[in-house]
Image (cartoon, rainbow, N blue to C red):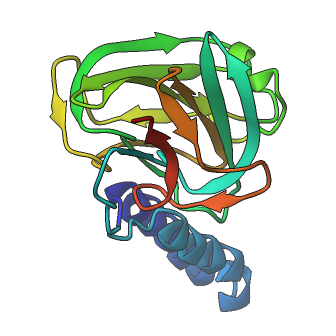
């Protein structure tokens, strides 16, 4: 479990205790429900990373876009509040660029969110090539967390950060990749293959 879940749950439980002490225990129920939700939201399950020349999904969620862009393909994944929000690197390699961009907080499922919303862009280069992926904030998700920094070396599917409370993750693939997912498909970070390297 991500440590943020424990912090939020602890604060809500403290609030529940104060409300129950000052009024009645049933007035504290909303705090207890929110505390349980925070523990659920910030879960961080282990994943089995598939081997081979593949790119894995950087996020849990629903594929909402697969389209040609910048000479390759862009895959966009929408995360609702019930999805795991821990993000992972699609390929192994070294982080060659991390770029934070301020922006709007449009609904993350909308196409314009890919370019207009607040986002953190991570570029990874390694034996399989170069991939860029974006952690994109949404209408509710207004906090992007990135654990990694420029120059860090990652294994495939390694945790790189998270986005709090609903969001979007985009992956930009070069022409050397063959996309293996379709719009409407659900994927899991680290374990779902989203593309294979062309031979």
For the point 39% across and 46% down, which residue is it? 54
* Rendered residue at 38%/59% (across/down): 7
Residue 18 visible in the shown view: no
Q: Where, by quadrant of the figure, is residue 69 drawn?
A: top right
- Image quadrant in which you'd find residue 109: top right
Instruction: Please determine whether, in this image, residue 48 is positioned above or below residue 125.
Output: below
The N terminus sits in image quarter? bottom left
Q: Nearer the viewer, residue 40 or 125?
A: 125
Identify the residue shown where x is 33% and y is 44%. Answer: 53
Residue 80's x, y, as percent? Answer: 71, 55
Of all residues, the one furthest to the front in this rendering is: 199
- Which quadrant would the C terminus be assigned to in this image? top left
Residue 182 is left or right of residue 95, and the answer is right
**x and y, in percent, of residue 68 in the image:** 71, 21
For the question of whether residue 195 can be seen, the reply is yes
Horizontal placement of 96 versus 138: left or right? left
Residue 16 placement: quadrant: bottom right
Closer to the camera in the image, 56 or 41: 56
Whole-percent x, y for residue 103 in the image: 67, 13
**Is 117 situated above or below 26?**
above
Q: Is residue 105 left or right of residue 191?
A: right
């Amino acid at each position: 479990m991500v440590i943020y879940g424990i912090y939020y749950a602890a604060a809500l439980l403290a609030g529940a205790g104060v409300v129950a002490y000052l009024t009645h225990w049933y007035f504290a129920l909303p705090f207890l429900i929110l505390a349980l939700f925070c523990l659920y939201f910030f879960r961080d399950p282990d994943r089995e990373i598939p081997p081979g020349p593949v790119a894995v999904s950087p996020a849990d969620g629903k594929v909402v876009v697969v389209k040609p862009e910048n000479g390759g393909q862009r895959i966009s994944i929408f995360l609702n509040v019930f999805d795991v929000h821990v993000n992972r690197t699609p390929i192994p390699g070294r982080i060659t660029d991390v770029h934070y961009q301020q922006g709007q907080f449009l609904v993350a499922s909308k196409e314009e969110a890919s370019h207009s919303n607040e986002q953190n862009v991570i570029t990874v280069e390694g034996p399989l090539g170069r991939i860029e992926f974006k952690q994109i904030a949404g209408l509710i998700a207004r906090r992007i967390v990135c654990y990694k920094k420029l120059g860090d070396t990652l294994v495939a599917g390694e945790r790189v950060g998270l986005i709090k409370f609903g969001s979007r993750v985009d992956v930009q693939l070069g022409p050397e990749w063959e996309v293996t997912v379709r719009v409407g498909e659900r994927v899991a970070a680290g374990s779902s293959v989203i593309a294979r390297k062309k031979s």
